[in-house]
Amino acid sequence: QVQVVESGGGLVQAGGSLRLSCAASGSIFSINAMKWYRQAPGKQRELVAIITSGGRTHYANFVEGRFTISRDNAKNTVYLQMNSLKPEDTDVYYCAVDVSGRDYWGQGTQVTVSS
């Protein structure tokens, strides 16, 4: 069994910053890609950023250089540093961890950006 837990969400004013964390634990032999998604009520979940096991990163176009994804392999943890937040970034943010070819999801963490 693999457990994935996100943290770091909250309420912030537009232009502010938040740092999300996502830690995986349990029966983990190897972690491949680690990903952040977000989802608003009634909308499809969308990819925000991905980091491979080798450290390569990819971002959605709407990130526009404002977010940085990173990982600490020793801690099985992925981070999402979010700067210059906008009200439209308000969503539930989910982490997905690829363990041996299968994605494990966290419960999500709410990010609310006030204008």
Image (cartoon, rainbow, N blue to C red):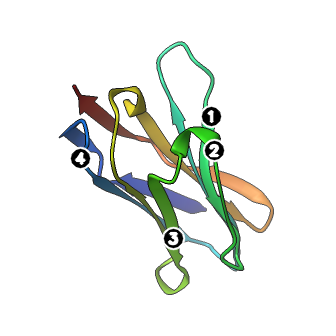
Q: Which residue is mark 1?
A: 46
Give the number of marks.
4
10 left or right, relative to 52? left
Quadrant location of the C terminus? top left
Residue picked out by circle 4: 16
Q: Amino acid at mark 3?
A: Ser
Sequence-first disc among 1 and 2? 1
Classify 10 as above or below 76. Answer: above
Residue type, label 4: Gly
In the displayed orientation, state which residue is furthest to the right.
Answer: 101
Counting other residues with Cα less than 10 Å from the Cα at mark 1, is it few (<14), some (14-19), or many (20 or more)? some
Placement of 62 over or under 30, stated as above or below: above
Between discs 4 and 2, the one toward the N terminus:
4
Q: Which mark is residue 60?
A: 2
Residue at image mark 3:
70
Are the residues tagged 1 and 2 within 8 Å (C-beta)?
yes
The mark that comes first in sequence, 1 or 3, is: 1
Q: Secondary structure at mark 1?
A: strand
